[in-house]
Image (spheres, rainbow, N blue to C red):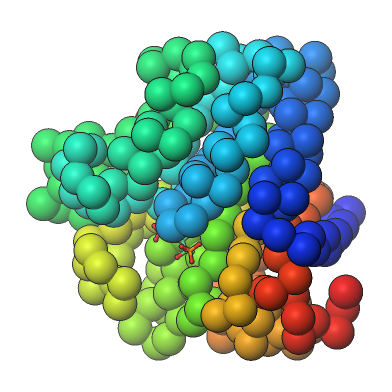
Amino acid sequence: MSTTEICSYPTVQELSKALADYVANLSRETVSARNRFTVGLSGGSLPRILAAELKHRTDIDWDKWIVFFCDERLTPLDSEDSNYKLAKEELFDHVSIPESNIYTIDESLIADAEEAANDYQDKLISVFAAMNTAKFPVFDLLLLGMGPDGHTCSLFPGDAYAEVLNESLAWVTFVENSPKPPPRRITFPPTVLNHAHNVAFVVTGEGKKVVLNKVIDLHDTTYPAAMVKPINGKLVWFLDDAASANLVAL
Ligand code: 6PG
C-alpha cells in the first residue's frame, strides 16, 4: 500500500536538515536490510538543497550507494546544463560514493536521444535485473523536483508529451523538444517512478504554490508531478512554507 506525507519547513535550511535526516535514516535501514542503497537524483535546485546538510553527515555508508539520474540533459558531462555536473559539484565531490557506482549517460550518444535512452536503460538493467526479475526497477529512493508548470524529471505537461507520459514498457525514455532548455533529454517514465520503495519531492519557493495546490490537493494529473503515486511505496513532500502556503492538505 502506498502512503503520502507532507512536511513543510519555515526555511530551506531547515528543510535541508530534515531531508538529510530522512535520507540518512533510509540509507542506514536499507543498507542493513539489502546491503546497498539505490538512489535516483534529479536536477534543478534539488542537488544543492539535498547536499547542503547531507554532505556533512558521517553516519552514511556512501560506498553502498548506487546512483542513477531520474532525468538527464543530453549535453557533455562537463556542461553547465548537465545534471551530473551539478550533482558532482554539490555532492559527489564531498562524499565517498565509488565512481563506478554513479551511472551517467554515455556522452558519445548525446546527438541521438533514443540511443542515449536505450544505453541508459541497459545500465539500469545491468544493476536491477540481477536484483529482481520484476518488470520495472525498484529504487530504494527517488529524489524529485517539480517545476512551476508541474513537470517532474523531464516529464512535461501537454499533448506533445503524451507518449512519454504514457510510456508503459521502457525503463528510460526521451524527449527531443523539452520546453525547458536544453531540448534533448532522457527521463524515467511515471511507471518507473511509481515502482520505487520511496519517492521524495523537494519543492521550495513561492513560485510553486499555485501548482502544488493543483498537484497535491486536486490530484490534477494534467500536471505530470500528480502522476507520481508509488504503487507500494512511500511518497514524501519536503516543502518550504513559501511553497506550501496554498495547500489545503497540510
Ligand atoms: C531537470 C530536473 C527537473 C527539476 C525541476 C525543478 O533536469 O530540469 O530534473 O525535473 O527537478 O525543473 O527544478 P527547480 O527545483 O530548480 O525548480
Quadrant holding ligand 1? bottom left
Q: Nearer the viewer, residue 163 or 90?
A: 90
Residue 17, horizontal then vertical, whole percent = 73, 42
In the rendered view, tell whether residue 123 sits above or below residue 222: above
Left or right of 184 in this view: 190: right
- Quarter of the image where the N terminus is located: bottom right
Left or right of 48 in this view: 61: right
Left or right of 48 in this view: 174: left
Q: Residue at x 49, y 72 (%)?
A: 147
Q: Residue at x 73, y 16 (%)?
A: 59
Q: Which residue is drawn at 19% across and 45% down?
A: 79
Q: Which image quadrant for residue 28?
A: top right
In the rendered view, tell whether residue 218 sits above or below residue 192: below
Q: Is residue 26 visible?
A: no
In the rendered view, tell whether residue 93 sits above or below residue 16: above
- Quarter of the image where the C terminus is located: bottom right
Q: Which of 19 and 37 is in front in this view?
A: 19
Left or right of 138 in this view: 5: right
Residue 154, horizontal then vertical, whole percent = 41, 63
Q: Is residue 75 visible?
A: yes
Q: Nearer the viewer, residue 6 or 20?
A: 20
Residue 62, horizontal then vertical, whole percent = 59, 17
Q: Which residue is drawn at 38% across and 77% down?
A: 161
